[in-house]
Every structure is written in structure tokens, then in C-alpha cells.
Amino acid sequence: MPHWLVIDLEATTEEGGWPVEDMEIIEIGATLVAADGRELDHFQRFVRPQRRPCLTSFCRELTHISQAQVDGAAPLGAIWPQFERWLAPYRDKLAGWGSWGDYDRRQFVLEWQRHGLQSSLERLAHVNLKQRFAEARQLKRAVGLHTALQLAGLSFQGQQHRALEDARNTARLLPLIFAH
Ligand code: AMP
Ligand code: MG
């Protein structure tokens, strides 16, 4: 049975949002799931941003991530090898990785380049689960995670805009998406 990795990122931001180039990862959440959506393992780390180390109040309120949590975290260059070590035993079983939309993939690509990091995710297929959900449900346009869960008769569990919780809630939709 192939496994799937669902990843969600939190990043620095301001009201109205920033272009991806101006954002930096502050939290990585990943859930490794079996095809039926059951969690086999998970990964969560805060990441200390380098360019704008001080979070905006908007960002702190949106994510419920505190300044102390990112101050106490390591930068991406130190976190990434930890992620790779965590993923290593599962790599051969992975069918691919997914995220809700394309934002997380774009943010990763940018920061892997910026920090000169090798990533095993680059060799894996990425699935835009937001788009795939819209196709599976024959929606006219892609919807947010909260709405998607509601359409599936589910409600968001835990804190929204937190990486691991967002990833876990996204993973709950996998069986519906892959049933099509
Ligand atoms: P999410 O996975 O939906 O929590 O979003 C990932 C990141 O995108 C957040 O950590 C923020 O940096 C940014 N973001 C999400 N929603 C907003 C918003 N309404 N305004 C500004 N930035 C946002
Ligand atoms: Mg999130």
C-alpha cells in the first residue's frame, strides 16, 4: 500500500498578504498517511525566519504562533536535515506528497534554493489537493480547506492556520479525493 505525505506551511505575512518571495517559513507540519487517510507518523517544527525575524501582529494572530516560538527555533538550514531524517525510512513507500493548493510547494522551492538545500521532495510527485478536490467534486472553482471539509460533511478539527493541524485536516479529504 503506498503512503502519502501531506504538508502544510505557515509563513511570515502581513494583512493583505505578501508575495511568496517575501514570505518565509515559520512552521512545517507533515502527516504521513496510509491510502485510507490513517496517520502513520507526523512531523512538526517551528522555523526561525531570517529576513524578517520579528512576526507582525497580524501573523501572530492569524497563526497563534508566538514570537518566542520562532525565536527559540532553528533556521530552515538546520530543520531541513531533521525533516529528511524523519522521512528517510518512509521514502520508498511514498506515492507522492500533497498540499492544499500550490502555495506550499512554491514556498519550499524558493527556500530550498535560497538556503542551498537538497530535498527528496523534489524527486516526488506533488499533488495539488485543492485542485484535485474541486475536480473530484466537480466544483466550478477550488475552495478553501474549511469549505471543502464542510462539503464533505466534516468540520475542521483543531486550530486553523497551524501547520500540522491544517495538514491533518487536509489528509482527512484524501480518501474522497482518491476515490475518483
Ligand atoms: P494557511 O496554510 O492557510 O494557514 O496559510 C499559510 C500561510 O499563508 C500563513 O502562515 C500566512 O503566512 C499566509 N496567509 C494565509 N492566510 C492569510 C491571510 N488571510 N492574510 C495574509 N496571509 C495569509
Ligand atoms: Mg496552514
Image (cartoon, rainbow, N blue to C red):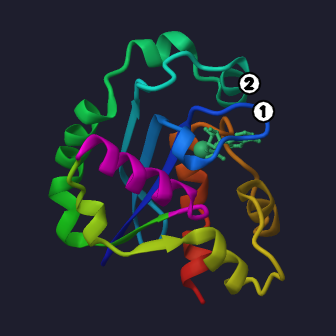
- Mark 1 residue element: loop
The range drawn in magenta is: 99-116
Is residue 113 on the magenta stretch?
A: yes
Most common SS among magenta residues: helix
Residue 122 in percent (x, y) is at: 29, 65
Q: Name the side, left or right, on which 114 lies relative to 87.
A: right
Task: Tell me which label, 2 or 1, sits earlier in the chain.
Answer: 1
Q: Is residue 64 above or below residue 174?
A: above
Front-most of residues 151 and 83: 83
Q: Amino acid at mark 1?
A: Glu
- Residue 128 showing in the rendered view: yes
Q: Amino acid at mark 2?
A: Phe
Q: Are marks 2 and 1 in contact (CB under 8 Å)?
A: yes
Residue 97 in percent (x, y) is at: 40, 66
Residue pictured at 54% horizontal, 82% vertical: 178
Front-most of residues 79 and 86: 79
Circle 2 packing at 10 Å, graded few (<14), some (14-19), many (20+), is: some
Residue pictured at 72% horizontal, 41% vertical: 17
Q: Which residue is mark 2?
A: 58
Residue pictured at 84% horizontal, 82% vertical: 140
Q: Is mark 2 within 8 Å of ligand 1?
A: yes
Q: Which residue is mark 1?
A: 15
Image quarter of the N terminus: bottom left
Q: Which mark is residue 52?
A: none
Q: Is mark 1 within 8 Å of ligand 1?
A: yes
Residue 16 in percent (x, y) is at: 79, 39
Is residue 158 on the magenta stretch?
A: no
